[in-house]
Amino acid sequence: MDSLSLLEEAWLPVRRHDGTRDWISPLQLSDPGIAAFDAPRADFNGALAQFAIGLLQVSTDVDRPARWQQLFNSPPDTATLRQWFEPHATAFRLDGEGARFLQDFTLRAADGEALGIGNLLIETPGENTVKNNADHFIKRGHVRALCPHCAAQALLTLQLNAPAGGVGHRTGLRGGGPLTTLLVTQSTSAHPRSLWHNLWLNVRDRPAFLATNCDEARTDARFSFPWLADVAALQKADGATAPAQVHPAHVYWSMPRRIRLDFDNVIAGECDLCGRHSERLVQHYVTRNYGLNYKGAWNHPLSPYYESKEGWLPLHPQPGGIGYRHWLGWVLGYSTDKKHLRPATMVEYALARLTRKLPDRLRLWAFGFDMDNAKARCWYEATLPLYGLPEQDEGTYKELEGEIGYWLAGAELAASYMRNAVKDAWFSADARGDFSHLDASFWSRTEPAFYSQLRQRLDVARANAEGGRVDRAQHWHGVIQGAALSLFDTVIVGAGPVERQKPERIAQARRQLCMNLAGPKLKAALGLPTDPKPARKSAKKTAEKA
């Protein structure tokens, strides 16, 4: 039987503009009738988007921005894509002897204890969880057999997001469960957009992508696709893999886990994920520890980063989800005395050089796992509007960074005031526990007002109007004041049973909340002028008057 080629096989689940579902090969990525990926799992959709972007980036021969622009407006045909992909055909075989896509070069099915294929899914209960009978919410044995298409998607998703998995089972190049941010189009009747446009927005012309010093020693395919050779060919025993050791394309094809799918013992039946019949359902895989150990100054083009004592590190989703509080850092970046964030380099590049030439209003698609070490707590996904931001110049970006930074600093302070007031009303200020739901309520309540004000601010910049900063800050002050008090009064504290309330404590907590929300500290955080404190009379002068 011929080996399964992931460049020829129709293994990518998609949704067409008419709402129907289909499966396509990468050669059909430019089909204008395709709206988006449509996998049976949200994390698979995110992984497939990164797969397609990586494949296009490593394959394209586009050598200048003008040519990139042409292909955005007039996508390449199947013959062109086939010409791009053909040099990499050997790297995208899923089964058969020798090299296999994202699988260890030396492992064979008989080389270790067989693990159930469901263990490729990140949320599957681990060995200790099953042993302790603690799989209360996500049960064991839910997925026992996968078709080759879903097995490939699961393998890809695990390698991209690989969490901590025990001794020598490495995390991914960006750590376990990284945050990914992609630019996507906002399709309209005047400018209908397809999956191609959303993918191509996140691909750079070849010279720009290879600007990170690609020499001949690293152009061998194994330095881009590490499964084409033994792990030892890239990394010494007990060593590490740094950016200087590989080709720039390696960031899209990292392989922290040593895995080999078992295609020797397949069965016929229905796939436990997509439900389609297959004559080759995969039930098991083998794995070994000590795969590629990623260290050094890696800079993945699809992830935002924050500065720490160890250097720049990739961001990861955190409890509370994705919302407008992340807009500034992930879109423009910002710096304060305590915090420094920068957006994904692809977002920076696109906003600076590409998107001003496009007729589209863009959005930022952000997604990723919230991981607690090896445990997946949640999958978060959201799109953040840009409201024509790419139409602005670099000077406007700086102004926006400063002004929106004030809005977010004020909102964070107001949220903390509300949280402390609730704790005071219920318990005491130093009460411990998870109060993240209080912050989530505040951010959710104020989100529509933030985006409305952001859109108005960008309209002002587009019209080259000046002034209004103080008025906007004062309006935002009123928004966050009103939200904090309303939540305290009607949703959180005030909604509790009367017989369990302590009116005096509640009144004191609310009084303090009102003082804080109107106080100089919050005004300063918002960049508003504060009333000077009245000068205190010295005790000596007071005594002399007496």
Image: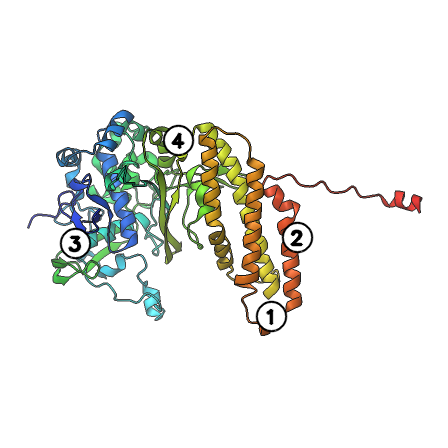
| Distance Cα–Cα, label 2 vs label 3 | 62 Å
Label disc, if present, on residue 501 of the rendered structure: 1
Mark 1–mark 4 Cα distance, whole angstroms, equals 53 Å
Residue at (57, 47) in percent of width and height = 478
Mark 4 in CB contact with mark 2 (< 8 angstroms) = no
Q: How crowded is mark 2: few (under 14 residues within 10 Å), some or many (20 or more)?
A: few
Instruction: Residue under label 4, please give it.
Output: 391
Q: Estimate the spatial distance between the alpha carbons at disc 4 and disc 2, rounded to whole Å.
A: 41 Å
Which of the pair 54/499 is nearer the observer? Answer: 499
For badge 1, the amino acid type reads Gln
Tell me whether circle 4 and circle 3 mark residues in contact (CB < 8 Å).
no
Mark 1 and mark 4 lie on one chain; the one further toward the N terminus is 4
Foreground: disc 2 or disc 3:
2
Q: Mark 3 points at which residue?
A: 148
Question: Which circle, 4 or 3, is nearer the viewer?
Answer: 4
Residue at 18 percent of width and 52 percent of height: 149
Query: Could you tell me the amino acid type at mark 3?
Result: Pro
Element carrying mark 3: helix
Is residue 177 visible in this depiction of the protein?
Answer: no
Q: Which amino acid does label 4 sit on?
A: Glu
Residue underneath mark 2: 515
Residue 141, located in which quarter of the rendered image?
bottom left
